[in-house]
Image (cartoon, rainbow, N blue to C red):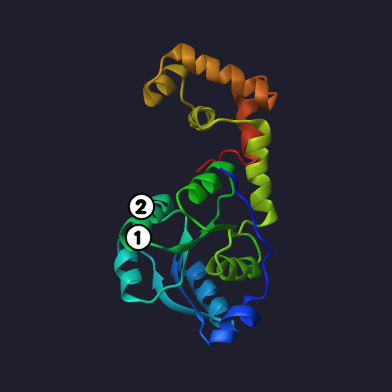
Amino acid sequence: MTIYILPVRNRFDMTSAATNQKIRIMIVEDHVLVRLGLVAAANEEPDIEVVAEVDDARQVIETFAANQVDVVVLDLRMPGMDGIEIIKMLHSKCGSVRILMLSSYSNSDDITRAIQEGANGYVVKGMPLKCVLEGIRAVHAGEVYLPPEVQDRIKERTNLNISSRELDVLKLIAQGKSNKEIASRLGIVEGTVKAHLARIFAKLGAVDRAHAIAFAIKRGLITLD
């Protein structure tokens, strides 16, 4: 799948002002300080209005249905259900939904999975608030919003040609799992695990597991939760 970003323009001048309608957003975020900051920043914008706040994944569908929401700003890590499952649920039950992911995690696997499952953009929490606001306007306009740092993470994985299964193995060795435990978890034989490890070491230029884990974290391929 090709992931791209279109240039972000001043949507207040071009879209919302023309129709005199604000972009109605719902913020799904369990950290109260982050949520309050987002609400305050968004409501200061002349073309954006926060119409709903959710801190519990179980409330997402009901709250979305009760409000005329244009864009959902969704945290990737929510108690009880992660953001990927919420994306699937929103598209299944609510039809066409525009979603901007907001996460502390910038590893390529999380980003790619979110976009593949139907997110329209991805912003990392450490980025300036203007990126979130740009993202809201962009996804509302039908664009895919991926700031340069996020694009770099995806390109890194693509350039290294790391497969999804190799990423699974990387995550498990980062958790301290043995070859036998990895084989059991993934439903493969130990010989296949060893083959995956050999390819991982070759692609990353790693000499052992610790080196491979350190390299993968540095390059944003995996995250230690």
Kindly identify the residue that appears in the image at 51 percent across and 67 percent down. Answer: 34
- Quarter occupied by the N terminus: top right
Kindly check if marks 1 and 2 are in contact, taking CB atoms under 8 A apart as contact.
yes
Tell me residue 10's x, y (percent). Answer: 67, 75
Residue where numbered disc 1 is placed: 57
Q: Is residue 125 left or right of residue 54?
A: right
Kindly identify the residue that appears in the image at 31 percent across and 60 percent down. Answer: 93
Q: Is residue 164 visible?
A: yes
Q: In this view, does 171 lie to the left or right of 54?
A: right
Q: Relative to the observer, which residue lies in front, 182 or 136?
A: 136
Tell me residue 21's x, y (percent). Answer: 51, 84
In the picture, residue 154 is in which quadrant?
A: top right
- Amino acid type, label 1: Ala
Q: Is residue 184 left or right of residue 14?
A: left
Mark carried by residue 81:
2
Label 2 environment density (alpha carbons within 10 Å; few <14, some 14–19, many ≥20): few
- Amino acid type, label 2: Met
The answer to whether residue 210 is above or below residue 159 is above
Tell me residue 73's x, y (percent). Answer: 48, 65
Tell me residue 113's x, y (percent). Answer: 49, 45
The answer to whether residue 44 is above or below residue 118 is below
